[in-house]
Amino acid sequence: MLVFGIFWGLVVLAFGVAAAVLVVKRPPQRRTGWGVGWKPAIQHQELPPPPQDPEMLYGEPLVETFASHAPPLADLPLPPALRGQLDGFALGRAKRIVEAPDLLTHAAADSESWPQVEEAVARALAVAEAHHVEVGGDGKSRLVQALALCATQGVLLAEWRQLEDGATVWDGSAARVRLSDAYAILRIAEASQRRLLPDLFAGVLRRGAEFELSLLVPYAIAQGFYLRLHGNPPRVAAA
């Protein structure tokens, strides 16, 4: 404006603005797959392992353990911060297991893990019978399939543990696992109970009022987890 005056200065300024707006943009390049910079949504990202995830002995599951509805590892004097870290880590892992697609179909095709799923279902049905739950009718297949899905979720959690720690070390009938595994079992059960409860009731003809049918969900998950720990570590990634 000092050189050309106010009028011509405004003309030059207007020309520059118009050129910036009308500049030809490069056509967007076609992207394949997820792209280099793609990251999963935050709700699908597993939290990093906690600084400490000590070993624990995990014995054969009992349905009475879940009947108390106590927090995982309530009998251990763990610092609150560590409990929060273990639970947060387990929550992310449980979410990935619950959301794994076609889980039951893949388990049925796995000759190594499917026998453990069947055994876990048989043990869950035996517990139900011992508590005076009569199973049968047209809904029995729905109940059995729901229990099989729970057991498969436990199997996947056990395979994940084996991928990280190698073959399971046993002390008698108790397996050495991680504290976060106990939290993961309860988190998986919480996410599955409400969804699977109609299928459980569909196969029940009669039951006593003293037994919570929903306890079969964490029990079947824990049985699948425990039984699969006896096998060899899987040859592929768990999830």
Image: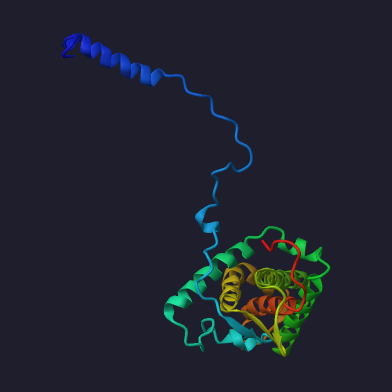
Q: Quadrant of the C terminus?
A: bottom right
Judge by depth and name the residue closer to the eye, 129 or 74: 74
Percent across and percent down for residue 2 are: 16, 14
Residue 78 appears left or right of 194: left
Question: Number of labelled discs?
Answer: 0
Residue drawn at (31%, 14%) of the image: 15
Give the left or right position of residue 6, taking residue 36 as reference: left
Q: In the visual, does 41 lie left or right of 235?
A: left
Is 75 above or below relative to 87?
below
Q: Position of residue 214 (x, y in %)?
A: 62, 78
Quadrant in which residue 220 is drawn: bottom right
The quadrant where residue 60 appears: bottom right
Screen quadrant of the N terminus: top left
Visible in this render: residue 211?
no
Q: How is the image coloured?
A: rainbow
Residue 91, image x, y percentages: 54, 68
Q: Residue at x 58, y 66 (%)?
A: 93
- Relative to the observer, which residue lies in front, 199 or 94? 94
Task: Return the residue found at the far right.
Answer: 111
Residue, x 74% and y 75% (percent of image)?
228
Q: Position of residue 67 (x, y in %)?
A: 59, 86
Asked if residue 69 shows in the view, the reply is yes
Identified at 32% across, 17% down, the residue is 16
Quadrant location of residue 104? bottom right
- Does residue 36 appear left or right of residue 15 in this picture? right
